[in-house]
Amino acid sequence: MIKRKCSQLIEEYLEYFPCVALIGARQSGKTTLLDGLDGTWNYFDLEKSADHRLISDAPDLFFRMNPDRVAIDEAQLLPELFPALRVAIDNDRTARGRFVITGSSSPELLSSISESLAGRIGIIEVSPLSLEELTPEDATFYKLFEKPDDFKAIIDALSERRNLNDIHDYWFRGGYPEPWSRNEERFTEIWMEQYIQTYVERDIARLFPSLNRARFKQFTEMLAGLSGHIINYSEVARALGVSQPTIRDYFSIAHGTFLWRQIPPYERNVKKRIVKHPKGHMRDSGIVHHLLRLRDLRQLQSHPSMGFSWEAMVTEEILRGLSNAGIAHDYYFYRTASGAEVDLILEGKFGVIPIEIKYNQSVSPGKVRAIKDFVSEHGLPFGIVIDNGESVRWITEEIVAIPFSFCI
């Protein structure tokens, strides 16, 4: 059993809020986290007809009879649950850690939460396994975001945590827990195919019954080729044969259901003309490689999408690590009209930290001009290049190169 990094965050939130919501992609491990709650919790699964009927027949009565230590899986399947949950919480607002709910479908779930439970609930996103979670010790890298003033000492203390073979294995396979638990190539192939089929035929069909499922399935297959790219909605719409508003809706649905991560452009205090189209990537590299029909790591390394896939995987790993540690952040990318680009801009209480992601083992000073200019123009103390080098080294006085194997 792999201990999830967000387990500690769940325990912390249960001390602060009456209710905690675990949201994330289907099969990312939310139900397993509920199973990890101690034996005093009562568990209900709304995908089971008996549990659904028990709660849906009289939600207010259910909570009067079950006022504490209640865990409800797939809560978005019962919208009328949320007003009743609000009433139950308000009957004793001083009590904490009373309810845990999960949901796989962010648009509907977050809408219900914002309407009924604002101020009463802590929300934690549960992603598929991160590479950091396959390493027992916490990653020192994330202390950069907790104590940014000590960045030089923290950077000096970084050391290798994973070998390159393990990293590449994870990159190719992705992070969904079930294929990792079986560790069989044929099972993984079948599981991935069924996952996409279930996502479209059940989850999307249930959430958006009027949606053209065949066309949306085509769209999900297109996403693998778009992953890591700046998105031009009109071009994608033409390729799929739909209107631009429809393709915008498709991207919104894919982002809201955790298949895709939309990354907005960084527009704060910018002195140059920038590209304002969003960028994005599929959240799991294993799904990407399955949709691209890549058989093994060697085929991936020679594929035109290799660099985009690597950048997306590293970006996702960093964002998952920040979320698991409970570090509030916003994320962006930066690209000027002249082509200067920084892959990831992170902003939070720690300030602004730009990150450039390279697959190469070494990066020359001439290859970091864009991030160096960004650091200078925004008055930042440092910028980071994440590569596959063998040691931490300062490329310039402001730009430090950190091997990915030292970060996770």
Image (cartoon, grey):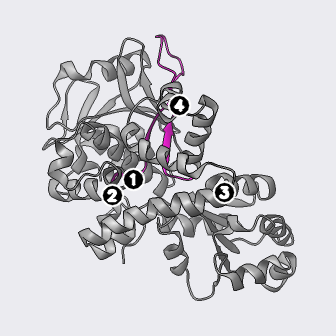
Q: Residues within 10 Å of mark 3 (few under 14, many from 20)?
A: some
User: Foreground: 235 or 182?
Assistant: 235
Residue under numbered circle 3: 207
Tag 2, which secondary structure? loop
Identify the magenta region: 257-286
The reply to whether discs 2 and 4 touch (Cβ–Cβ < 8 Å) is no
User: Foreground: 87 or 56?
Assistant: 56
Q: Main secondary structure of the magenta part?
A: loop
Name which residue lies at 87% across and 72% down: 91
> Earlier along the polypeptide chain: callout 1 or callout 3?
3
Q: Amino acid at mark 2?
A: Gly
Tag 1, which secondary structure? loop
Tag 3, which secondary structure? helix
Residue 304 lies, in percent from the top left, at: 24, 36
Residue under numbered circle 2: 174
Residue under numbered circle 4: 237
> Earlier along the polypeptide chain: callout 4 or callout 3?
3
Tag 4, which secondary structure? helix
Name which residue lies at 65% across and 61% down: 206
Vertical position of residue 104 compared to residue 377: above or below = below
Gap in angstroms between the C-alphas marked 1 and 2:
6 Å
Q: Amino acid at mark 3?
A: Leu
Foreground tag (1 vs 3)? 3
User: Foreground: 363 or 220?
Assistant: 220
Picture quadrant where residue 2 is located: bottom left
Residue under numbered circle 1: 284
Q: Residues within 10 Å of mark 2 (few under 14, many from 20)?
A: many
The reply to whether discs 1 and 2 touch (Cβ–Cβ < 8 Å) is yes
Residue 34 lies, in percent from the top left, at: 55, 76
Q: Amino acid at mark 1?
A: Asp
